Image (spheres, grey):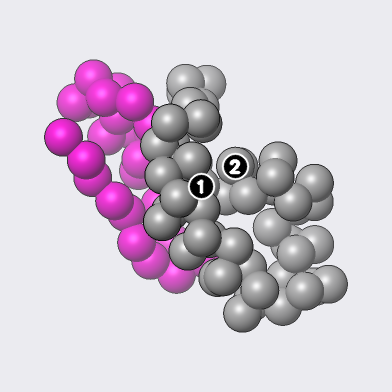
Amino acid sequence: MKIFLVGMMGAGKSHWAKILSKKLKITYYDLDNLIEILEEQSVNEIFEKEGEDYFRRVESKILKSKKFFYFWRNPSY
C-alpha cells in the first residue's frame, strides 16, 4: 500500500504521515529529509538560496528516480 500526502507547507503532512504509518503498520518516508541530505542544506535554506522552482525540480527528480523509495527510510516515529 502506498499513500502520498500532498499539501501546502506547514499543513501537517509529516505529522499525519507518522500517525498513519503507525496505525497502518507501514513504513513512513519523508521526502523533505531525503532532499536535505542530498542537497546538504535544509529545505528553508534551499528555498532562500535556490528558490521554490529549484526545490520542486529536485523533489520531482527524486520521486521519478525511485531513490526516495529504495534508499530512504525514516522509522524515527
The answer, for residue 14, to whether it is visible in the render is no
Disc 2 residue crowd, few under 14, some 14–19, many 20+, Cα 10 Å: some
The answer, for residue 9, to whether it is visible in the render is yes
Residue type at mark 1 is: Leu
- Point 63% across, 49% down: residue: 35
Horizontal side, residue 13 vs residue 74: left or right: left
Horizontal side, residue 19 vs residue 72: left or right: left
**Badge 2 is on which residue?**
34
Q: Picture coordinates of residue 18 (x, y %)?
A: 39, 33
- Point 80% across, 62% down: residue: 45
Per the image, label 1 sits on a secondary structure element best described as: helix
**In the rendered image, which quarter contains the N terminus?**
top left
What range is drawn magenta here? 1-28
Magenta includes 19? yes
Horizontal side, residue 58 vs residue 64: left or right: right
Quick check: 55 above or below 26? below
Compare residues 61 and 35 and report the one nearer the observer.
Answer: 61
Q: How many marks?
A: 2
User: In the rendered structure, are the residues bearing label 2 and label 1 in contact, judged by CB atoms less than 8 Å apart?
Assistant: yes
